[in-house]
């Protein structure tokens, strides 16, 4: 979006414009020379796949920060229109490459799209291309190898985050949900592909199907069918699983927990009664990351239970607290030191919440704004977006209307120097964010009640 120009310190506007044109001309010349000398494997477009991905990565690394760049000594905000056009040109080439016959070319295109979608907000650009992209992603998921399927599933999640929770996002999710679910529950599919599909199914459903009880129920059921493979057997012992499977169980459980935050009270009560005892037993798992995912899910379910009934308490709470205390003080030498430290930290937090409803607040700063993670539901929601957007999560918190709505931030801020100089206090921001999140929770509870009869 073009930004308004402030002041004329440091030279006339015409001289600055000509200087920019010269710099742009130099950059284009360098790019042309660079491309002329490349020798990598080329797709139908004539551009090396590795070079294109490298260019896109370099471009996003430099331009994703340009929204807040101010010309030194002039106070003038740099115009982003040229950078946006360059980004879109590169993405158009990547979209074309999704239909290439070469698996390597398609994989490079998917990686470039992942970088682009996570680094910038591209709603207008994607709106008119969403059907083409969805068709290509569906083809990669159906016919690609494991690596291509995993990459395509990740781009599916990012596409939903870009399109938001409106009609466009719902259309894409309804198209892609069946194939994502099919790969997820296919025991013969690649583990990396199944893991990516578990994460994508949870994110896409959370964003695009929060008001659709049928899609929500199906997605919850498919995720549940995966992680129940870690539940205790009839004799109470935990099953032995193949290497790599606990990571899949963890991802499916975390996505399932994310979708639990959308369920009506009647469904939450059923979930608590059925899953809490079994999750409690899974705290004995030998896999540290799965144990941590289980502990966080137990805390989230307790928070959901208390959200419905302030007097809620797990029926075997004393035994659960004993298990949590053991894990919070675990000094077992055969575990890696970092694993022990991470486990102790997480389970101390879970124990404090179960016993006293205490939660260690976390502040996430982006630009001049911040959100406060002050509960297990809010942490799971933030972590889910962070897992998909990675380093781009702060950019999306600043500019993506979907994330700003979810976290109660309001429309994206348009700031000039005078506004930047008058920052509101931390207490004011905290109170505002908490009030906005609670208001959104109340609104979601109303939607839950409307879905309760269906579920």
Image: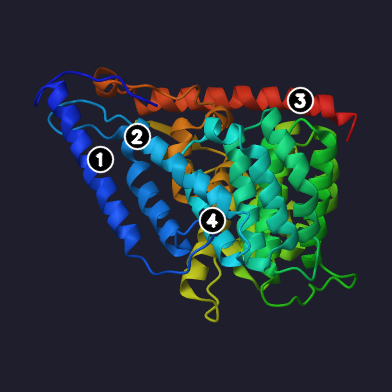
- Sort mark 2 into few (<14), some (14-19) or many (20+) by Cα contacts within 10 Å: few
Query: Label 3, label 4: how many angstroms apart (C-alpha)?
Result: 39 Å
Which type of secondary structure does the marked residue at label 2 adopt?
Answer: helix
Whether tag 2 and tag 1 are in contact, CB under 8 A, the answer is yes
Query: Label 3, label 1: how many angstroms apart (C-alpha)?
Result: 51 Å
Query: Label 2, label 1: how many angstroms apart (C-alpha)?
Result: 9 Å
Label drawn at residue 24: 1
Whether tag 2 and tag 4 are in contact, CB under 8 A, the answer is no
Q: Is residue 177 left or right of residue 287?
A: right
Q: State whether residue 80 is above or below residue 141.
A: above
Query: Label 2, label 4: how many angstroms apart (C-alpha)?
Result: 22 Å
**Residue 295 location, quadrant:** bottom right
User: Who's the residue at 39% across and 41% down the image?
Assistant: 86
User: Who's the residue at 80% across and 61% down the image?
Assistant: 185
**Residue 253 location, quadrant:** bottom right
Whether tag 3 and tag 1 are in contact, CB under 8 A, the answer is no
Q: Nearer the viewer, residue 213 or 44?
A: 44
Which type of secondary structure does the marked residue at label 1 adopt?
Answer: helix
Query: Would you name the residue on which mark 4 appears?
Result: 109
Query: Would you name the residue on which mark 2 appears?
Result: 82
Q: Nearer the viewer, residue 79 or 93?
A: 93
N-term-proximal mark, 3 vs 1: 1
- Sort mark 3 into few (<14), some (14-19) or many (20+) by Cα contacts within 10 Å: some
Q: Nearer the viewer, residue 292 or 207?
A: 207
Whether tag 3 and tag 2 are in contact, CB under 8 A, the answer is no
Q: Is residue 5 left or right of residue 326?
A: left
Which type of secondary structure does the marked residue at label 3 adopt?
Answer: helix
Q: Where is residue 35 shown, x and y percent of the image?
A: 35, 58
- Sort mark 1 into few (<14), some (14-19) or many (20+) by Cα contacts within 10 Å: few
Residue at the farthest bottom position: 334
Q: Where is residue 433 shown, x and y percent of the image?
A: 49, 27
């Amino acid at each position: 979006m073009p930004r308004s120009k402030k002041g004329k310190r440091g030279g006339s506007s015409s001289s600055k414009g000509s200087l920019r044109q010269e710099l742009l001309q130099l950059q284009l010349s360098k790019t042309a020379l660079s491309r002329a000398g490349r020798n990598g494997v080329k797709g139908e477009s004539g551009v090396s796949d590795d070079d294109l991905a490298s260019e896109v990565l370099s471009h996003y690394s430099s331009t994703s920060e340009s929204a807040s760049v101010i010309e030194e000594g002039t106070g003038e905000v740099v115009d982003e229109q040229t950078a946006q056009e360059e980004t879109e040109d590169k993405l158009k080439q990547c979209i074309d490459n999704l239909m290439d016959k070469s698996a390597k070319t398609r994989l490079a295109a998917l990686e470039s799209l992942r970088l682009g979608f996570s680094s910038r907000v591209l709603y207008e650009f994607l709106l008119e291309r969403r059907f083409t992209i969805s068709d290509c992603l569906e083809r990669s998921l159906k016919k690609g190898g494991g690596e291509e399927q995993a990459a395509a599933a990740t781009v599916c999640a990012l596409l939903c985050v870009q399109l938001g929770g409106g009609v466009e996002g719902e259309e894409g999710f309804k198209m892609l949900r069946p194939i994502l679910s099919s790969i997820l529950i296919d025991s013969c599919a690649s583990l990396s592909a199944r893991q990516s599909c578990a994460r994508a199914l949870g994110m896409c459903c959370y964003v695009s199907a929060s008001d659709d009880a049928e899609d929500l129920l199906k997605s919850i059921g498919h995720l549940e069918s995966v992680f129940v493979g870690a539940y205790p057997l009839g004799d109470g012992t935990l099953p032995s699983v193949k290497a790599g499977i606990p990571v899949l169980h963890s991802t499916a459980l975390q996505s399932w927990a994310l979708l639990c935050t959308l369920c009506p009270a009647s469904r939450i009560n059923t979930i608590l009664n059925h899953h809490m005892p079994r999750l409690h037993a899974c705290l004995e798992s030998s896999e540290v990351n799965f144990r941590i995912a289980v502990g966080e899910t137990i805390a989230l379910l307790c928070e959901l239970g208390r959200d419905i009934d302030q007097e809620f308490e797990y029926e075997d709470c004393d035994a659960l607290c004993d298990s949590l205390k053991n894990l919070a003080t675990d000094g077992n030498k055969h575990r890696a030191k970092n694993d022990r430290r991470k486990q102790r930290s997480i389970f101390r937090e879970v124990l404090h919440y179960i016993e006293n409803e205490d939660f260690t607040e976390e502040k996430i700063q982006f630009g001049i704004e911040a959100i406060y993670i002050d509960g297990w539901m809010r942490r799971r929601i933030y972590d889910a977006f962070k897992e998909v957007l990675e380093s781009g999560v702060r950019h999306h918190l600043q500019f993506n209307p979907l994330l700003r709505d979810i976290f109660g931030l309001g429309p994206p801020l348009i700031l000039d120097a005078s506004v930047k100089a008058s920052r509101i206090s931390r207490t004011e921001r905290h109170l505002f964010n908490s009030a906005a999140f609670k208001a959104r929770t109340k609104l979601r509870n109303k939607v839950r009640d409307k879905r309760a009869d269906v579920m």
